[in-house]
Amino acid sequence: MSTPRQWIAKQFYALGKPNVLKYVNELDQMQWLSRDELVARQHQHLHRLLEYANSYVPYYRDLFKQIGFHPGDFAADPATFSDIPLLTKDNVRQNFDRLITTEEARRQTSTKTKTGGTTGEPLWLIQEPTYREYNTAHVYHKMTWSGWQVGQPQAWLWGHAVAGAGAKRSFSMQAKDWLANRTESNAFHLTEERLEKLARQLEKQPGVVIWSYVSAMYRFAQFLQQRGHRIRARALYTAAEPLYSHQREFIEEIFACRAFDNYSCVEVGSIACECEQHDGLHITTRNCHVEVLREGKPVPEGTDGEFVLTNLTNLSFPLIRYRVEDWGSQSPKKCDCGRGLPMLNIVEGRIIDHFKTRDGRLVWGAFIIPMMPLLGSVKQYQIVQETMDRLVFRVIRTGPINEEKFRDIQQAIKTVLGDNVSAEIEYVDSLPSTPTGKHRYITSLVD
């Protein structure tokens, strides 16, 4: 039975965001279609996107003419989609104005936003209301996989630098939070005072679903353990960073519920998420078309490669075959949940999370992470590949470090990356976060 607060939240969405509820219903029905039916539907959306881009977006109109491509080619043979050149972040920056729709009515309702600049310079984008509404719908749809229903409590340990470290939400935003049965806290400004306030709020909301960056969720869990707080959450949804096994085990133990790994980005929105089986991520086919490539060529299912994404809901600023600079693989298996949605294996993070070797290999740096707890009193760390021959472990410690175990790590690094590679520890008082308050455990400075 719904509580009065939940009933109010349902009415808030029914009256204020009817499209979100309509799209949630669409997604609820689509998930049970067969793989072939989902592919057919996605091809329809792709064809519509290509037709629109050819008619209203100067960048694509000129590009299609230059390469001799027409949207009708895709309708006749979907394989021709790969004839379209990949879109890079530099392409977007250099052609920003020409990537915006010339359809005036759609331009008038669209807004400008930017990414967090995880890999360097932030990327500016244009987003239309349909894109934002589908994004919200995908969030709520995925939350139902944990048993949550629209109107039940939700909490967001989230944030962005543009809000400012100490910025407060406006009265209107606080009112909308209350109506939506939503609790917000700024992950960009994680003080003990703010975490204490959030903990006390969530202790009063049994069955809450909590969303956060992986590193922020992990830090919040550490805080709860230290202070003895007990939150009866329904589920945890993590995003923005890879969810490593030791992090999953810890936050699930502290919150006494399951964690759902979610994969999304500002540029294209929802991409994939775990269901209640926790055996890979389901691709959100209504929102995003996913390709996995190496050197520009498709790889077989189960083989790692670079993700190339096409968003299907943002006609104002189409991103077609966009290099998001993430890495992983598409899975050939079918999930036991019965959903027809295709699957990704657990996403292995950004390309900058990979180390480059002198013999031309690209190695996911997370092979080191399971060994880090052996070092002892480590509060936080970041592993940086400064050159092909040198790794630096920047470590915030709370006590002694086991130097013998670090020598074991050094030897493992030589075994994986090459005998030429050295590793050393630097003890620091703080570590840099991305502009959105996230933390990068692994990063490479090698071009």
Image (cartoon, grey):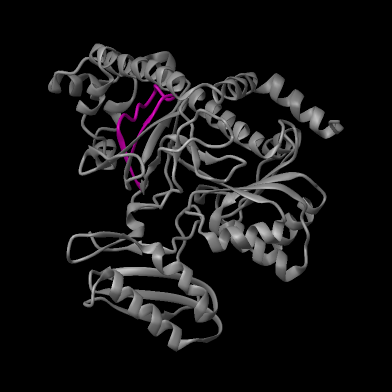
Tell me which corner region of the image, top left, top right, bottom left or bottom right, holds residue 315. Answer: top left
Judged left or right of residue 295, residue 351 is right
Q: Residue at x 22, y 65 (%)?
A: 357
Q: Give the x, y percent position of residue 321.
A: 30, 32
Q: Quadrant of residue 113?
A: top left
User: Residue 188's x, y, as percent?
Assistant: 56, 56
User: Would residue 157 be seen by someone viewing this image from the given angle?
Assistant: no
| Closer to the camera in the image, 124 or 72 | 72
**Residue 167 spot, x, y in % from top left:** 61, 51
Left or right, residue 92 beside residue 32: left
Say whether residue 73 is visible.
Answer: yes
- In which quadrant will I find the C terminus? bottom left
Horizontal side of residue 207 vs 37, given as left or right:
right
User: Which residues fall within the magenta stretch?
Assistant: 308-326
Kindly identify the residue that appears in the image at 66 percent across and 57 percent down. Answer: 252
Q: Nearer the viewer, residue 95 or 139?
A: 139
Identify the residue shown where x is 24% and y is 25%. 59
Residue 183 magenta-highlighted: no
Please state which of residues 176 and 132 is positioned toward the viewer in this rendering: 132
Place of residue 187 in the rendered image (x, y in percent of width and height, measured from the top left): 59, 54
